[in-house]
Image (cartoon, coloured by chain):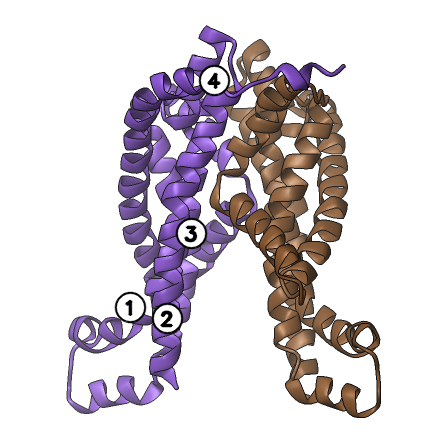
């Protein structure tokens, strides 16, 4: 059924995966910076990071996407569709990730930090060598879930004309009218990528909770 | 290159389009409320079906995983383009609301599942000891204890769904984002409409998130 549609859809799938990876990289960096920023001893940095997180979590990712693509050029900043897509998706997921980073850092037992102080570690050393390695383990499952959400969110950038998988499917539907086959393939292809990720995240979750119990 | 310096926020224009955007926000809210009502029912049905015999639970589990693993936008396209081929022609708004309801129903079924599993085993045994039938066990014992702790999660998903409603613009529902798009293409001013849409979402979802946080804190205290 409709094997001839696959090459076009798979070309789109390549772009979907590129978008996912590029946005995930941006989100990871932003999440670490903003998550640490929210725990900063300096109030202006806390406020800045907090505002970023609340604005990007409080509005729709689609609205952010449109804003970056349509409104930003009027400030003289012109982004191509791919850059606007990566920026909007990365900053959106980064805001959710920042909360994960903050939560994980706060959940490291107080005794660990006290032990660091007792051993005369500096604040930076304590963060880098004691707190972050332990917090990082706890961040993994939520980060995995964010990655799956991100993969699904890349479908939205079809609306700003990036030819990823959903866009290719939609155009094929318009030109060939073979609605049933196209959308079935589209659903199956997303499922084929997302579901193994879900299983992977669950496996990591089990290992992390076993690690935390130990 | 420095044309951003000449850019100014046109307050008069912003105020002029605000009433139109607020009317569209009302459509967005309606879609959220109706969609969520569907999701609450669908979620419960899926959660209960998942506890049934394997012949029911297995396909239902697959359905939940499938819905959760594919993008809502594609699901909306499927409903919007495929239903009419089978003689079901619904308005874009109804199609969109059903799509939201099914998608978030799959997510809420997981919340129900966690809530039901959270009810102590002794409660079930007590129901058997008191000779309650299945229906009364559920309505009088299990659900009243399972539901309240779920409320914060329900609140979270309500807010998430509210923020997903702009997707309905892709299937021609004239909600908030679509209205901004129409204003933008008519006046060639995109900054004010899209910025206002962002602010309206923020103004509605941020206070709602604070309420949910307070609910969460209350249930966390009760558990201690």
Figure quadrant of the N terminus of chain B: top right
**Pointer 2 residue:** B115
Foreground disc of the pair 3, 2 = 2
Q: Residue at x 62, y 28 (%)?
A: A68
**Pointer 1 residue:** B147
Q: Which mark is residue B10?
A: 4
Residue B52 to residue A67: above or below: below
Disc 2 to disc 4, C-alpha distance: 50 Å
**Chain coloured brown:** A
Q: Say whether disc 3 or disc 4 marks the residue closer to the N-terminus.
A: 4
Q: Say whether disc 3 or disc 2 marks the residue closer to the N-terminus.
A: 3
Foreground disc of the pair 3, 1 = 1
Disc 1 to disc 4, C-alpha distance: 48 Å
SS assignment at label 2: helix
Q: Chain of mark 4?
A: B
Foreground disc of the pair 3, 4 = 4
**Chain coloured purple:** B
Do callouts 1 and 2 point to residues on the same chain?
yes
Q: Which mark is residue B106?
A: 3
Q: Work out whether residue A169 can be spotted.
A: no
SS assignment at label 3: helix
């Amino acid at each position: 059924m409709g094997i001839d549609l696959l090459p076009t859809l798979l070309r789109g799938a390549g772009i979907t995966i590129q978008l996912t990876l590029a946005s995930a990289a941006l989100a990871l960096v932003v999440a670490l910076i903003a998550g640490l920023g929210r725990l900063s001893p300096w109030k202006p940095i806390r406020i800045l990071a907090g505002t970023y997180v609340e604005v990007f979590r409080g509005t729709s990712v689609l609205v952010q996407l449109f804003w970056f693509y349509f409104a930003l050029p009027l400030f003289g900043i012109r982004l191509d569709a791919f850059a606007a897509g990566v920026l909007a998706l990365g900053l959106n997921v980064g805001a959710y990730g920042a909360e994960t980073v903050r939560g994980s850092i706060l959940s490291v037992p107080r005794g660990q930090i006290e032990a660091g102080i007792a051993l005369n570690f500096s604040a930076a050393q304590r963060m880098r060598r004691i707190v972050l390695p332990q917090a990082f383990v706890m961040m993994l499952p939520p980060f995995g879930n964010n990655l799956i959400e991100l993969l699904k969110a890349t479908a939205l950038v079809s609306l700003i004309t990036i030819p990823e998988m959903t866009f290719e499917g939609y155009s094929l539907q318009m030109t060939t009218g073979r609605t049933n086959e196209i959308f079935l393939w589209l659903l199956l292809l997303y499922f084929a990528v997302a579901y193994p990720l879900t299983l992977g995240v669950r496996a990591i979750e089990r290992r992390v909770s076993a690690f935390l119990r130990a | 290159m420095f044309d951003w310096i000449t850019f100014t926020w046109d307050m008069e224009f912003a105020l002029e389009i605000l009433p139109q955007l607020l009317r569209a926000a009302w459509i967005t809210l309606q879609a959220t409320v109706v969609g969520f009502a569907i999701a609450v029912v669908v979620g419960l049905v899926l959660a209960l079906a998942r506890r049934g015999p394997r012949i029911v639970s297995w396909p239902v589990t697959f359905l939940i995983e499938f819905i959760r693993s594919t993008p809502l936008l594609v699901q909306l396209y499927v409903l919007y383009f495929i239903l009419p081929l089978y003689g079901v022609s619904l308005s874009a708004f109804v199609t969109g609301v059903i799509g939201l309801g099914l998608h978030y129903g799959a997510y809420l079924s997981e919340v129900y599942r966690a809530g039901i599993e959270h009810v102590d085993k002794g409660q079930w045994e007590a129901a058997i000891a008191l000779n309650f039938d299945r229906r009364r066990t559920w309505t009088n014992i299990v659900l009243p204890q399972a539901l309240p702790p779920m409320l914060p999660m329900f609140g979270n998903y309500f807010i998430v769904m509210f923020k997903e409603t702009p997707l309905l613009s892709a299937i021609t529902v004239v909600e908030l984002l679509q209205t901004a798009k129409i204003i933008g293409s008519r006046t060639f001013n995109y900054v004010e409409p899209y910025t206002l849409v962002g602010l309206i979402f923020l103004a509605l979802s941020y206070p709602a998130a604070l309420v949910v946080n307070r609910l969460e804190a209350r249930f966390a205290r009760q558990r201690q």
